[in-house]
């Protein structure tokens, strides 16, 4: 913090009378230092101080009114103005853990309690609301926990009902990071012009966790505000708005105060927030409240409801699915030969108007229209010239890359919630923005949501480019695929572009060692996903454990698309000599069978020999490798296999292998749903069958799971999955490693991420240097 606000830190040291060179002397003023840092970060102290300025303004205004009045108060204007300000102004802050911290014996938690207590003593108009827990004896002698809502003023406590009040927010740290600036502009447009339009004329404003004041009497006489389910009602705030509207209420928007607010300003923090909101919208899509609102609204209000709630996420998912449908359709046309026959039609020659139409469309596909509300709000507050300048600066700071990346976040988590459910709360935090996230952390977080999907699109584009000849002589291919190439680039590399110090060589080496160690750590039982790849791989498919048969079958049907590559490409190989028989496709599966047998032999050898007979295990792997090389030589010599066939076969069999992995993950839940649970219904003594969690069914589930593990090639599947993960990680890490060789890349990234800080003269280089030195343990 002193590096960020260097001049203010020097002024602070001068005020407390400490020399800037005497570092130990500051330790005697830690309370003052703590407040100084809190007033410049995303903290409660800063928010409270900002709110209390309004009480001070009321007090000053009252004092001047009393002095200028006709009545003489005998010098009591100051005390009278304070009393009137106390009547007019009270600020309530909800702190759920205040009672826990107060009763705790831990020094850190006790310090948190004392800090909040000091705030209340400093600002008498501040109130802290929290839930207190007490044990009350029952008539039967047992103790029961009872909970009370408590409102605290200094040292006084009293029970009462609580209404939480917050205000319009700007993100505090937007002055430092580009990501924070993007989110600050987005948040500002949403809580200002967005809320105004939602309230009037659309009449579809709900509760969004912003400065909303509830009519307590209205809600407690109509069933309350809260919902019972923490999964369906993950976005509990908007369901309060649903309840109000369904029960005849009207939600308006009034702007009073604008103040600073803590917000997610790191790439991973923002992704967690977007994932949480997308999960919540998925559950809203499936809930009854949206259904009832849609039936009770008129047509225009129903459309407004759709496009301002779940419709935005549904349309985002449809936009991404359209890319898949388009590319798979082009893949079918290219591999089946239909495209060639169409192009040979003499009636289809002049397609220049179609090229121009696609060129116009590709501009709008970059998502520029989503920036319009942001530009309108900045234009209204600061002028449209300033709005245009900020828009240009955002493009130079790769804002399209950032927002395109989070389009994938919204699509993945919204679609998975629609398909399987299982939404959950994700803690985001309010950390500072200069912490470096390791490659392994980014890989764990974005592998399934972005990397896998981007690599699938990349293979589609490569196959389409290799086998399609329709657009090579015109600019139509560029117009059609440029936005998709941009999408692939964003989904693969945006987490690293916006990761501080990602292209510093020593950080790159540390990230590589950490990721390689994490990938090679075997044994997933009892380990956290951050410690072992196997534990992470299992945890990534936890959402399938409680999935329904319908969703599992739909997942299987969607996975069938991955077989199109092999079915189409094998008929274009030089080795088949133009044969179109189905036996060519059937024989191509021998490659998959040989690969699985090789993995099975290696996994059995590791299980039998790796602990005691290392040499035998290495000889076994050498024999398997030589056999595979011999088969490949035989194909080259005896069956006229071409070099181009090898590359084409890789493009054909990689998606097939991933299909096998997907199906293997579905087999466990399907086996439990179709076999274990029906048998459990017949065998369970308590009559609950598969839903029983008692000892009567525990052994049955354990035994069936052990049988399923023994009869299936799960160890080979896991080794195959590890090989895929190694390949994906190497493909993504290779450009990062190459760029880390050039020092100017790291300097350019620092300027890109912290342009606002450079513009304000902040010492970002000193912050990063301090983080690299002191944050190594954390990293």
Image (cartoon, rainbow, N blue to C red):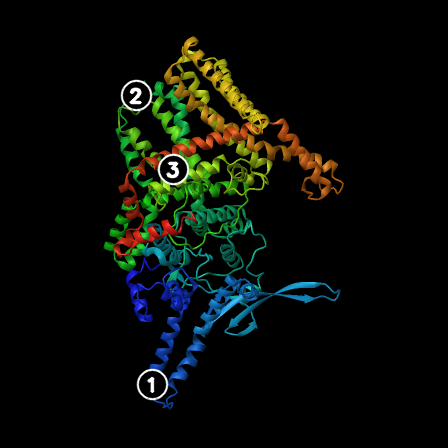
Disc 1 to disc 3, C-alpha distance = 66 Å
Q: Is residue 11 above or below residue 325?
A: below
Q: Tell me: residue 302, above or below residue 560.
A: below
Give the side of residue 664 with respect to residue 413, left or right: right
Q: Is residue 214 visible?
A: no
Sequence-first disc among 2 and 3: 2
Residue topped by disc 3: 492
Who comes first in sequence, dot 2 or dot 1?
Answer: 1
Which secondary structure, mark 3?
helix
- What residue does disc 1 label? 67
- How packed mark 2 is, by other alpha carbons closer than 10 Å (few <14, some 14-19, many 20 or more), is few
Q: Is residue 752 left or right of residue 513?
A: left
Label 2 SS: loop
Neighbourhood count class around disc 3 (C-alpha, 10 Å): few under 14, some 14–19, many 20 upward: many
Looking at marks 1 and 3 on the same chain, the residue that comes earlier in the sequence is marked by: 1
Q: Position of residue 145 (x, y in %)?
A: 65, 63
Quarter of the N terminus within the rendering: bottom left
Query: Label 2: which residue?
Result: 347
Q: Are marks 2 and 3 in contact (CB under 8 Å)?
A: no
């Amino acid at each position: 913090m002193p590096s960020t606000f260097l001049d203010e830190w020097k002024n602070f040291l001068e005020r407390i009378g400490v020399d800037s060179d005497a570092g130990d002397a500051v330790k005697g003023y830690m309370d003052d230092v703590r407040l100084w840092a809190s007033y410049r970060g995303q903290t409660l102290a800063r928010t409270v101080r900002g709110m209390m300025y309004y009480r001070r303004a009321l007090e000053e205004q009252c004092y001047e009114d009393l002095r200028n009045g006709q009545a003489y108060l005998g010098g009591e204007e100051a005390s009278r103005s304070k009393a009137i300000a106390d009547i007019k102004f009270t600020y309530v802050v909800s702190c759920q853990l205040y009672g826990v911290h107060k009763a705790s014996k831990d020094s850190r938690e006790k310090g948190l309690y004392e800090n909040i207590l000091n705030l209340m003593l400093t600002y008498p108009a501040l109130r802290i609301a929290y839930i207190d827990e007490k044990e009350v004896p029952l008539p039967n002698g047992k103790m029961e926990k009872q909970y009370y809502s408590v409102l605290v003023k200094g040292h006084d406590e009293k029970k009462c009902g609580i209404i939480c009040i917050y205000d319009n927010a700007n993100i505090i740290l937007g002055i430092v990071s580009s990501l924070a600036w993007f989110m600050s502009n987005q948040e500002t447009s949403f809580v200002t012009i967005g809320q105004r339009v939602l309230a009037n004329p659309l009449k579809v404003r709900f509760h969004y966790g912003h400065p909303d004041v509830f009519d307590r009497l209205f809600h407690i006489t109509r069933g309350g505000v809260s919902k019972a389910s923490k999964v369906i009602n993950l976005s509990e705030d908007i369901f309060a708005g649903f309840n109000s509207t369904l029960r005849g209420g009207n939600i308006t928007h009034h702007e009073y105060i604008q103040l600073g607010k803590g917000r997610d300003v790191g790439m991973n923090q923002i992704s967690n927030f977007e994932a949480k909101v997308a999960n919540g919208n998925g559950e809203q899509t499936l809930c009854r409240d949206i259904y009832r609102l849609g039936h009770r609204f008129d047509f225009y209000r129903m459309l407004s409801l759709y496009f301002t709630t779940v419709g935005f996420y549904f349309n985002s998912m449809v936009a991404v699915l359209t890319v898949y449908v388009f590319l798979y359709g082009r893949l079918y046309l290219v591999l089946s030969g239909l495209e060639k026959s169409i192009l040979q039609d003499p009636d289809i020659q002049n397609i220049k108007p179609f090229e121009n139409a696609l060129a116009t469309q590709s501009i709008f596909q970059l998502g520029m229209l989503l920036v319009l509300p942001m530009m309108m709000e900045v234009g209204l507050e600061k002028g449209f010239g300033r709005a245009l300048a900020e828009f240009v600066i955002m493009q130079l700071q790769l804002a399209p890359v950032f927002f395109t990346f989070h389009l994938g976040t919204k699509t993945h988590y919204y679609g998975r919630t629609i398909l399987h459910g299982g939404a959950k709360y994700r803690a985001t935090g309010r950390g500072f923005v200069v912490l470096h996230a390791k490659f392994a952390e980014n890989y764990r977080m974005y592998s399934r949501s972005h990397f896998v999907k981007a690599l699938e699109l990349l293979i589609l584009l490569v196959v389409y480019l290799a086998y399609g000849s329709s657009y090579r002589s015109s600019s139509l291919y560029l117009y059609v695929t440029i936005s998709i190439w941009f999408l692939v680039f964003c989904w693969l590399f945006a987490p690293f572009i916006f990761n501080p110090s990602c292209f510093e060589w020593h950080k790159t080496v540390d990230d590589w060692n950490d990721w390689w160690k994490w990938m090679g750590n075997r044994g997933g039982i009892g380990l956290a996903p951050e410690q072992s790849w196997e534990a992470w791989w299992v945890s990534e498919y936890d959402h399938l454990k409680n999935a329904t048969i319908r969703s599992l079958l739909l997942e299987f049907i969607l996975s069938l698309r991955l077989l199109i590559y092999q079915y189409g490409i094998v008929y274009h190989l030089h080795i088949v000599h133009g044969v179109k028989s189905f036996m060519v496709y059937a024989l191509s599966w021998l490659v998959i069978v040989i690969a699985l047998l090789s993995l099975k032999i290696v996994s059995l050898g590791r299980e039998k020999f790796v602990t005691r007979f290392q040499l035998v295990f290495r000889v076994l792997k050498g024999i398997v490798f030589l056999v595979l090389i011999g088969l490949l030589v035989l194909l080259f010599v005896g069956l006229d296999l071409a070099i181009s066939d090898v590359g084409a076969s890789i493009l054909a069999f990689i998606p097939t292998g991933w299909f096998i992995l997907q199906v293997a993950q579905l087999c466990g839940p399907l086996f439990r749903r179709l076999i274990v649970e029906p048998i459990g219904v017949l065998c369970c003594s308590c009559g609950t069958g598969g839903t029983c969690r008692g000892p009567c069914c525990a052994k049955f589930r354990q035994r069936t799971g052990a049988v399923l593990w023994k009869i299936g090639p799960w160890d080979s599947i896991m080794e195959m999955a590890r090989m895929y993960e190694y390949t994906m990680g190497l493909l993504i890490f290779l450009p990062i490693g190459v760029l880390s060789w050039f020092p100017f890349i790291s300097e350019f990234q620092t300027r890109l991420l912290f342009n606002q800080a450079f513009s304000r003269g902040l010492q970002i280089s000193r912050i990063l240097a301090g983080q690299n030195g002191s944050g190594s343990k954390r990293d």
